[in-house]
Image (cartoon, rainbow, N blue to C red):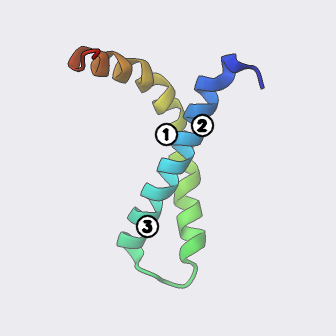
Amino acid sequence: MPQRFAPYLFGLLLSGMMSFIVSGIATFRATGMVDGFFGLWIGAWLPSWAAAFPTVLLAAPLVRRIVAAVTRSA
């Protein structure tokens, strides 16, 4: 894959991992360890990922600017 796609791949993987973890925690807190928990979790994760991926892509430039503004080079 060409290097120019790196930010998109990063966003895809980061949003997938983070939404997977957060949706799992939220699903567990809402339902406990019930029969069919994994199916409920995946059912919550997929739409969460669909929302998280474009959010990461849109938020990343803003977050980079904020980090640059509050940090300084050594």
- Tell me if 27 is positioned left or right of 44 in this view: left
The CA distance from mark 1 to mark 2 is 9 Å
| Gap between marks 1 and 3 measured at Cα | 17 Å
Q: Which residue is mark 1?
A: 52
- Badge 1 density bin: few <14, some 14–19, many ≥20, Cα 10 Å: many
Q: Position of residue 11 (x, y in %)?
A: 55, 33
Q: Residue furthest right?
A: 1
Residue at point 53%, 41% (across, down): 14
Residue type of the residue flagged with mark 1: Ala
> What's the residue at 52%, 41% (across, down)?
15
Identified by mark 3, the residue type is: Thr
Looking at the image, residue 39 sits to the left or right of residue 27; the answer is: right
Which residue occupies 59% across, 41% down? 13
Q: Is 22 in front, or is 3?
A: 3
Secondary element at image label 3: helix
Relative image position of residue 33 (x, y in whole percent): 46, 82
The quadrant where residue 43 appears:
bottom right
User: Does residue 62 lie above or below 54 as drawn?
Assistant: above
Secondary structure of residue under mark 1:
helix
Residue corresponding to mark 3: 27
Which badge, 1 or 2, is on the more N-terminal residue?
2
Dot 3: within a 10 Å radius of its alpha carbon, few (fewer than 14), some, or many (20 or more) residues? Answer: many
- Which percent across, then down, holds residue 28? 41, 72
Q: Residue furthest left?
A: 70
Per the model, the C-alpha gap separating discs 2 and 3 is 22 Å
Classify mark 2: helix, strand or loop: helix
Q: Which comes sooner in the sequence, label 2 or label 3?
A: 2
Circle 2 is placed at which residue position?
12
